Image (tube, helix red, strand yellow):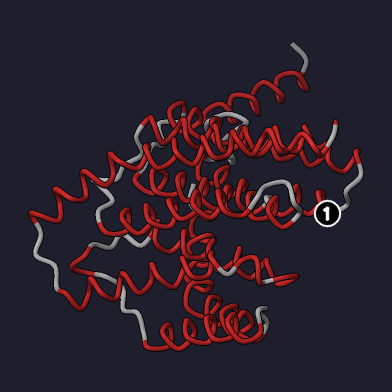
């Protein structure tokens, strides 16, 4: 054997000992990649051309496929961790929120069924922040997520043929809404049982409901957001990230300040009197970056640093 071949063999052995060529691609990093690269396929849809849509569909499908890859890799590398279990559903919720609201803005989907579907995700995120053990992902929810991703891809594919056919997709979307709420029933049942065993302070419970109302209100005023629609996507994404990784419970609920009530009031008043949103959304963006953004970016950095 030549000296050069021997060196290559030694290097190959060293790589194998470290875990192979996939050593740097940990499951949590792949999950984060699904979140961080998500704006790219969404941005391509704004170009409207057939090639742009094809690239968007291909890239979006590839990112959606990582939802399967990270699980397989976690089992192969024996890296199934509590953080990974929490991060995966968070990434799924952010994926669906960004993609579906973009499709609403571009006219692929009607707003009403998407609002109901995302309301379910907001509610489950809150329940999971209370009782993470009782709300571990069930198989029915995994199927729900797969169907949500698939329907988004089908809608983009159908638009390549004839955008008028999206009317047919709307019926499937309503069916998916029903299935999504059915998939939430196991969580609601388990949380209800946990609530019966837990003493919850009424003030902390009210503050949690205030957070829920705030984010549901953000979702409901989406049609009035205009070109600032992305602010609502960002705020909801931070909400999912914070709630999903907070490791909180009803007895240790995060404090919600009076500022949330002020922002909620400003949002509703501007929607009622101007029938459009601008100033309140800018305030919400600043507040979201201040309250949730810094914590989210810190968590992302910590996940990227972990081996």
Counting from the top left corner in percent of width and height, residue 288 is at 53, 76
Q: Give the residue displayed 68% in from the left and 82% down from the top.
A: 278
Q: Few, some or many C-alpha atoms within 10 Å of disc 1 (few <14, some 14-19, many ≥20)?
A: some
Q: Give the residue displayed 51% in from the left and 36% down from the top.
A: 176
Q: Give the residue displayed 75% in from the left and 18% down from the top.
A: 5
Counting from the top left corner in percent of width and height, residue 198 is at 10, 59
Which of the two residues, 194 or 71, is positioned nearer the viewer here?
194
Image quadrant of residue 260? bottom left
Considering only vertical position in the picture, is 48 above or below 138?
below
Instruction: Tell me, yes or no, if residue 82 can be seen here.
Output: yes
Q: Quadrant of the N terminus?
A: top right
Considering only vertical position in the picture, is 176 above or below 40?
above
Counting from the top left corner in percent of width and height, residue 270 is at 59, 85
Considering only vertical position in the picture, is 270 above or below 25?
below
Q: Look at the numbered disc 1 and give the secondary structure of its residue.
A: loop
In the orientation shown, which residue stands out farthest toward the top?
1
Counting from the top left corner in percent of width and height, residue 182 is at 37, 37
Position of 71 with respect to 164 (left or right) is left
Question: Which residue lies under the disc numbered 1?
Answer: 46
Image quadrant of residue 242? bottom left
Which of the two residues, 15 or 9, is positioned nearer the viewer here?
15
Q: Give the residue displayed 14% in from the left and 56% down from the top.
A: 195
Instruction: Tell me, yes or no, if residue 58 can be seen here.
Output: no
Q: How many marks?
A: 1
Which of the two residues, 295 or 203, is positioned nearer the viewer here?
203
């Amino acid at each position: 054997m030549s000296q050069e071949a021997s060196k290559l063999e030694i290097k190959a052995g060293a790589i194998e000992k470290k875990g192979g060529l996939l050593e740097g691609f940990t499951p949590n990093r792949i999950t984060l990649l699904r979140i961080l690269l998500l704006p790219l396929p969404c941005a391509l849809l704004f170009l409207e051309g057939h090639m742009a849509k094809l690239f968007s569909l291909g890239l979006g499908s590839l990112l959606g496929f990582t939802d399967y890859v990270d699980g397989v890799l976690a089992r192969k590398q024996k890296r199934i961790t509590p953080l990974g279990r929490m991060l995966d559903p968070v990434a799924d919720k952010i994926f669906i929120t960004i993609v579906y609201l973009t499709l609403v803005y571009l006219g692929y989907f009607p707003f009403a069924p998407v609002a109901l579907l995302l309301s379910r995700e907001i509610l489950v995120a809150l329940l999971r922040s209370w009782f993470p053990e009782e709300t571990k992902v069930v198989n029915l929810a995994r199927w729900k997520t797969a169907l949500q991703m698939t329907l988004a891809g089908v809608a983009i594919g159908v638009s390549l043929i004839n955008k008028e056919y999206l009317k047919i997709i709307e019926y499937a979307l309503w069916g998916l809404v029903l299935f999504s709420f059915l998939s939430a029933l196991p969580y609601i049942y388990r949380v209800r049982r946990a609530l019966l065993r837990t003493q919850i302070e009424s003030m902390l419970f009210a503050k949690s409901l205030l957070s829920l109302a705030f984010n549901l209100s953000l979702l409901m005023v989406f049609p009035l957001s205009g070109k600032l629609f992305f602010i609502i996507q960002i705020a909801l994404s931070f909400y999912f990230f914070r709630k999903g990784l907070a490791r909180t419970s009803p007895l240790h609920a995060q404090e919600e300040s009076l500022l949330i009530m002020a922002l909620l009031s400003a949002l509703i008043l501007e929607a009622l009197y101007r029938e459009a949103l601008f100033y309140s959304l800018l305030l919400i963006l600043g507040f979201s970056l201040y309250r949730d953004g810094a914590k989210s970016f810190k968590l992302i950095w910590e996940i990227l640093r972990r081996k």
